Image (cartoon, helix red, strand yellow):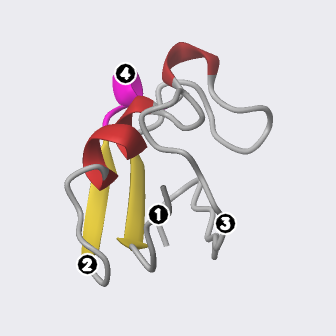
Amino acid sequence: MIPHTLILLLMTIVAFGAGEVIKGWDEGVMSMNIGGKRMLFIPPELGYGSRGAGNVIPPHAPLIFEVELLDIRK
């Protein structure tokens, strides 16, 4: 297992391109189609950068997400 690994199953409605998520998610998901699957490798500058995220994600951490786009709502 990779040090500082956090496994999440996230099924929620999020507005992409509206500043609700980190830039890496905005960039990685915007071009996806419904049913699409993608691995997102997000460098720290497109993630949480030098601030990290509380006690969960350390500063300067690269992030890896496996994403499946289930639906798009406008």
- Using the image, tell me which numbered label, if any, was put on residue 39: none
Task: Give the magenta-colored segment's residue range.
Answer: 43-47
Q: Observer-nearest residue: 50 or 33?
A: 33
x 39%, y 57%: residue = 64
- Give the labeled residue for mark 4: 45
Q: Secondary structure at mark 2?
A: loop
Mark 3: few, some, or many residues within 10 Å (few <14, many ≥20)? few
Q: Secondary structure at mark 3?
A: loop
x 43%, y 67%: residue = 72
Disc 2 to disc 1, C-alpha distance? 25 Å
Q: Quadrant of residue 7?
A: bottom right
Q: Quadrant of residue 23?
A: top left
Of the numbered discs 1 and 3, the one sitting upstream in the chain is: 1
33 sits to left or right of 55: left
Q: Residue furthest bottom?
A: 35
Magenta-span inclusion, residue 46: yes
Disc 3 to disc 4, C-alpha distance? 24 Å
56 sits to left or right of 69: right
Mark 4: few, some, or many residues within 10 Å (few <14, many ≥20)? some
Of the numbered discs 2 and 4, the one sitting upstream in the chain is: 2
- Give the labeled residue for mark 3: 12
- Give the labeled residue for mark 1: 2
Disc 4 to disc 1, C-alpha distance? 20 Å
Mark 1: few, some, or many residues within 10 Å (few <14, many ≥20)? few
Q: Is residue 44 above or below residue 40?
A: above
Q: Amino acid at mark 1?
A: Ile
